Image (tube, grey):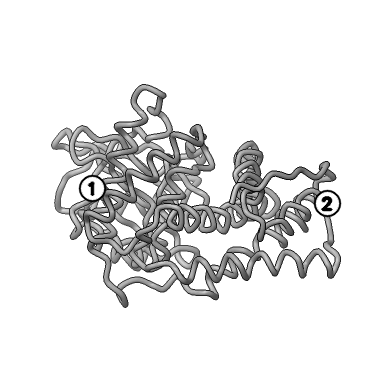
Amino acid sequence: MSSSRSTDSTSDTRLHALTQWLASLPSPAMKLDSLRPASADASFRRYFRVDGADDESYIVMDAPPPHEDVRPFIHVADLFAATGVSVPAILARDVEHGFLLLSDLGSTTYLQLLTPDNAHKLYLDAIAALVQLQAHSQPDVLPEYDRALLSRELMLFPEWYVGKHLGITMSDKQSAALNQVFELLLANNLAQPQVYVHRDYHSRNLMVLAEGNPGILDFQDAVYGPITYDLVSLLRDAYVQWDEEIVLDWAIRYWELARKAGLPVNPDIDAFYRDFEFMGLQRHLKVLGIFARLYHRDGKDGYLKNLPLVMEYTRKVAYRYKELAPLVKLLDELEAKTPQVGYTF
């Protein structure tokens, strides 16, 4: 999303300090009057684009302490770059003040360019890069995507989506049913093989490049966790939807490529796809909570339009598995929907 904040340095002390820092850099020399917003995200970070005297453009990250810390970004950038995938190079840094100068991977996201005609090529590129990244995974390098973190994410759903967005206080019986579903999801998620997890590997964070496609952004929250997480982020994207048969085809192509690369995916494709779906459900419930929180706590209403698609994903997975019937019943009660039946597995 585009930044709406002013670039007037007289009214923006952060921007004034950032401009002074850019001016102090020995190289590359910057055309400071070219500084303009590039993008902002759901955090306190924002990004600017600036032209250099060498006619190249660069990206400047403004990550204000104490809200943000650039050190995880630097760590993951170095880690991911070493795997051979395309991430921004860090050209200069001021860790104390939260400024980074980065190489520019362009301004064309997957989301902006995707069409039914080019999607297959772009998604196969993204799948190949994901396998390449995962193939270099090592334990004890990134924080663990452990039970505590997965559970905290799931709890965003009852707190922010149910409690704040729907304005509903669940009964003890409803809370118990939801916690039963959470336990099923956690058991599956934690039993999956562990790899590097980007955590937001989707169309808004993948840039279309002429070479080394895709460019990968927004990776500072990377962890070591379930192998299907990034794949489901990519294929069950909150911002763009694809037909079920296309998603299944791409998931199978990932599974085949991952096996060839020696990754520890489940050797049974049906079991792998179940892992994919259960991991997706954990993410969908979390995202419902996050989007509700962005609106009710942070005043960002741009994500509300994406809630129906995420809920559609949630319901489709819940309908397909008998053990998830309590979630279907709960969603029907929360949204006053007529119950439906029709399990697939």
In this rendering, is residue 105 above or below 161?
above
Residue 239, how many percent across, how many down?
52, 38
- Circle number at residue 86: 1
Residue drawn 37% across the image and 68% down it: 194
Q: Amino acid at mark 2?
A: Glu
Q: Which image quadrant is residue 97 in?
A: bottom left
Q: How many angstroms separate mark 1 from mark 2 (CA)? A: 45 Å
Q: Is residue 125 left or right of residue 186?
A: left
Residue 248, how many percent across, how many down?
44, 41
Secondary element at image label 2 = helix
Foreground residue, 243 or 155?
243
Foreground residue, 97 or 190?
190
Q: Is residue 324 left or right of residue 30?
A: right
Q: Is residue 189 left or right of residue 261?
A: right
Q: Which residue is mark 2?
A: 333
Q: Amino acid at mark 1?
A: Ser
Q: Residue furthest top?
A: 117
